[in-house]
Amino acid sequence: MKLGLHRSITFWSGILMMAFIGWAWRDSLSHGSWAELGWSRAAHCWGGLYVGHHANSLPVNFDADRELLGSDPPVVVEVFPAPVFLRHGEMSLEEMGAMNDRVERGEIPFTVDVLLKFTTVYGHQDYWVLFVPHWLVMAGLVVVWVGLLVWRGRRRKKKWIDPS
C-alpha cells in the first residue's frame, strides 16, 4: 500500500520548520534577542541571525536579553536584507566618518550592513561579524526539504515497482 505525502514525517517537519522560521523572521523585524559569552555574541534581530566574535581571551561571563529594536538614528529594517560578512579593518575611520555624514544627510539609509560596518571599525583587530538573513535560511530549508521529498518519492516509487 502506497502512503500519501500527507503521512510523511519529512513533509510535516518541513512545514513546521518553515512556519517557525517565518515566525522568527517576522519577530526579528521588531524585537532583538541576544546572548553573549565572553567576547562572542549571537543575536536574532533585523530580519536575520547575527554572530560576532573577538579572537581574544574569554572572560567567564554570560548575558542574554530580549528587547524592542531601536537606535539613534533608527536602523532601516529591510524585509530582505543582504547577507554580510565583515572583518575588522575593512573600513577606516575616515571612510566611516564619510559614510556617517552621508547617513546623516539622508543620502544612504542606515541599514543593517551600514551598522555592522560601523561595529567593525571600533572592534578588536581579530573581530569578525556574520549576518545571515532569515530569507536565506528559509531558501536553504526549502531546497533541502524539496530534495528530501523528491528522494522519498523516488525511493518509494522504486520500492513499489520492484518490491525485492
Image (cartoon, rainbow, N blue to C red):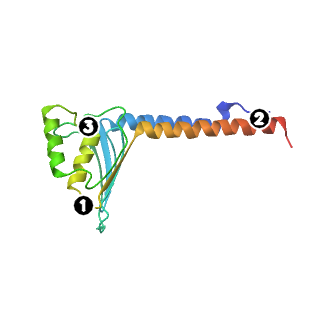
Residue 13 visible? The answer is no
Residue type at numbered disc 1? His
Can you give x and y, in whole percent of width and height, for residue 57 in the image?
A: 30, 69
State the residue in front, 66 or 147. 147
Q: Which residue is mark 1?
A: 124
Above or below, comparing residue 141 to residue 38 in the picture:
above
Can you give x and y, in whole percent of width and height, for residue 149 in the image?
A: 64, 36
3D distance between C-alphas at marks 1 and 2: 56 Å
Element at badge 2?
A: helix
The answer to which of marks 3 and 2 sits earlier in the sequence is: 3
Residue type at numbered disc 2? Lys
3D distance between C-alphas at marks 3 and 1: 22 Å
Q: Residue at x 46, y 41 (%)?
A: 137
Neighbor class of circle 1 (other Cα within 10 Å; few <14, some 14-19, many 20+) is some
Q: Which residue is mark 2?
A: 157
Q: Which residue is mark 3?
A: 111
The answer to which of marks 3 and 1 sits earlier in the sequence is: 3
Neighbor class of circle 3 (other Cα within 10 Å; few <14, some 14-19, many 20+) is some
Above or below, comparing residue 56 to residue 155 in the picture:
below
Can you give x and y, in whole percent of width and height, for residue 112 in the image?
A: 28, 40
| CB under 8 Å between discs 3 and 2 | no
Depth check, mark 3 against mark 2: the one in front is: 3
> Which image quarter: residue 81?
top left
3D distance between C-alphas at marks 3 and 2: 49 Å
Residue type at numbered disc 3? Thr
Quadrant in which the C terminus is drawn? top right
Neighbor class of circle 2 (other Cα within 10 Å; few <14, some 14-19, many 20+) is few
Q: Residue at x 42, y 35 (%)?
A: 23
Quadrant in which the N terminus is drawn? top right
| Residue 121 relative to residue 148: left or right | left
Element at badge 1?
A: loop
> Which image quarter: residue 161?
top right
